[in-house]
Image: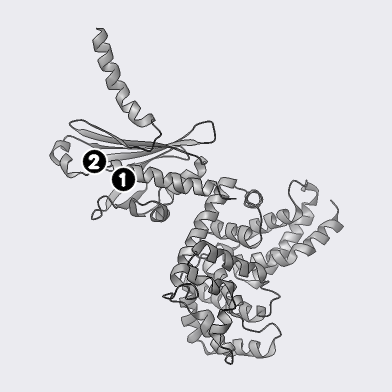
């Protein structure tokens, strides 16, 4: 029984460990039908700055080295077109599904969903996290064709940190 | 706070206030109207002024609120405004005739490239979102602190910093791509071309090399070049400078063209 409890505890905690670290290192959890990549990083800036950067579509290419362009209005229920450097030939048509100002932003399509969260740490810093879960019943058929998100996620988080802190440090 | 002190302070700050409003609305008439309305509102609200900010900050707060409701201030232009307005000027015989009359008869009708650089920035800054444009002028030209700008625009210091940084970055990119003074491949030579027209006896290149912005261009420090451009704006009063009447004529022309274009 004790061994069984330990096994389940590990299974439950594993994704938590992946999301709670603030090192800016991405972690990916794979199952047969899903893949989930997460990165978290501590940022020394106020939430409105991160929120403004995350929700101004046309400004992304200026500060974010992973995104070529985002067209559309990032607001709840709106559709956007995103081109990323990871898969330069594709245009992702996404819908903004979550929009809680300065706290949570989410967009996705039938294959996956990406969530950004901003949490205050109580010491003037925030923890920024982003998670993308992709998959579904057909996932095993195309899983190998989807590149790893790890490096791109790390770049995204570090770009956001650099830009937010640059803005925060303005005098 | 007495009405006498308010009058005195308003008079002291009126020049900067009108210059700010002109650069935001691109209209001398609207700038004058908003400045007058600012004074009226200030006198009406005199009893509510508690001295939590300086009177200058308070005047700019009232003026900025009025400007945000002004249609010409709200109107956003385009990055290539100077290309569009140049084409319009070239196809309008009256434009150069009027400009040459001002050049020949007005004591404030001289042409100086520096003044045109300031005028050009005013026009292109109207392609930024209004909040970014207001923040840049308030910080870089009228030298308010971030905390004071947050008061003036009724927003947080964090958002002021965001508007300043993004607005500044966009303007650096636009000028870096367009302005032939700082980029040999830049597409816009208007300040040089106009110098040839209005000051035909001058060696334009020699004149340009007197400007720090041009002298420093080869070093390629974009942030520094932007600061030098802002220094030019700080030094020029668009109502009283030696070129003010000529540049006001150009600004009126550009505003009319953009109102028809957009």
- Residue B44 position within the rendered picture, expressed as x and y whole percent measured from the top left: 78, 54
Question: Of the numbered discs in the image, which one, if any, rests on residue B7?
Answer: none
Which color scheme does this rendered protein use? one colour
* SS for dot 1: helix
Relative depth, front residue between B79 and B72 = B79
- Residue B93 position within the rendered picture, expressed as x and y whole percent measured from the top left: 53, 90
**Can marks 2 and 1 be said to lie on one chain?**
yes
Q: Residues within 10 Å of mark 2 (few under 14, many from 20)?
A: few
- The chain letter for the residue carrying disc 2 is A
- The chain letter for the residue carrying disc 1 is A
Relative depth, front residue between B119 and B165 = B165
Residue positioned most to the left: A141
Give me the residue at 58% from left, 72% from top: B212
Question: Of the numbered discs in the image, which one, if any, rests on residue A111?
Answer: 2
Residue B69 visible from this viewpoint: no
Position above or below: A138 against B30: above
Residue positioned most to the front: B219
Q: Disc 2 or disc 1, which is closer to the eye?
A: 1
Q: Given contact means CB atoms under 8 Å apart, are the residues at marks 2 and 1 in contact?
A: no
Give me the residue at 61% from left, 62% from top: B70
The residue that label 1 is drawn on is: A152
- Residue B19 position within the rendered picture, expressed as x and y whole percent measured from the top left: 67, 68
Residue B250 visible from this viewpoint: yes
The image quadrant that residue B37 belongs to is: bottom right
Question: Sequence-wise, which precedes: disc 2 or disc 1?
Answer: 2
Q: Residues within 10 Å of mark 1 (few under 14, many from 20)?
A: some
Q: Disc 2 to disc 1, how far (Cα)?
A: 18 Å
- Residue B49 position within the rendered picture, expressed as x and y whole percent measured from the top left: 77, 48
* SS for dot 2: loop
Is residue B229 rendered to the left or right of residue A145?
Answer: right
Position above or below: B115 against A94: below
């Amino acid at each position: 029984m004790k061994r069984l409890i330990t096994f389940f505890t590990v299974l439950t905690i594993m994704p938590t460990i992946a999301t709670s670290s603030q090192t800016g290192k991405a972690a990916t959890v794979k199952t047969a039908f899903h893949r989930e990549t997460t990165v978290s990083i501590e940022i020394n800036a106020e939430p409105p700055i991160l929120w403004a950067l995350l929700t101004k579509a046309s400004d992304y290419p200026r500060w974010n080295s992973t995104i070529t362009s985002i067209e559309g209005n990032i607001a709840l229920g709106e559709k956007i077109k995103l081109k990323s450097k990871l898969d330069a030939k594709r245009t992702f048509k996404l819908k903004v599904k979550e929009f809680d100002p300065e706290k949570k932003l989410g967009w996705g399509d039938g294959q996956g969903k990406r969530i950004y969260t901003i949490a205050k740490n109580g010491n003037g810093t925030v923890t920024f996290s982003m998670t993308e879960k992709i998959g579904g019943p057909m996932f095993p058929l195309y899983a190998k064709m989807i590149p790893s998100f790890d490096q791109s996620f790390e770049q995204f988080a570090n770009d956001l940190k650099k830009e937010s802190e640059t803005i925060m440090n303005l005098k | 706070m007495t009405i006498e002190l308010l009058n005195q302070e308003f008079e002291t700050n009126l020049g900067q206030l009108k210059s700010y409003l002109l650069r935001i609305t691109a209209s001398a008439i609207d700038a004058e109207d908003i400045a007058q309305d600012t004074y009226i509102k200030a006198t009406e609200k005199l009893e509510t002024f508690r001295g939590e900010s300086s009177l200058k900050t308070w005047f700019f707060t009232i003026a900025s609120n009025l400007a945000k409701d002004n249609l010409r201030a709200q109107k956003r232009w385009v990055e290539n405004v100077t290309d569009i307005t140049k084409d319009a000027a070239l196809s309008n015989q009256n434009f150069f005739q009027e400009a040459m009359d001002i050049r020949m008869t007005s004591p404030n009708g001289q042409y100086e490239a520096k003044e045109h650089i300031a005028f050009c920035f005013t026009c292109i800054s109207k392609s930024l979102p209004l909040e970014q444009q207001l923040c840049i002028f308030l910080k870089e030209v009228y030298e308010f602190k971030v905390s004071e700008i947050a008061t003036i625009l009724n927003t947080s210091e964090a958002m002021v910093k965001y508007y300043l940084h993004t607005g500044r970055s966009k303007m650096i990119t636009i000028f870096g791509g367009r302005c032939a003074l700082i980029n040999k491949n830049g597409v816009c030579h208007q300040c040089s071309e106009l110098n040839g027209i209005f000051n035909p006896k001058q060696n334009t290149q020699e004149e340009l090399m007197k400007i720090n912005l041009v002298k420093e261009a080869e070093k390629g420090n974009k942030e520094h070049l932007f600061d030098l451009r802002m220094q030019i704006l700080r030094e020029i009063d668009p109502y009283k400078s030696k070129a003010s009447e000529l540049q006001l004529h150009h600004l009126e022309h550009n505003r009319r063209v953009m109102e028809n274009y957009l």
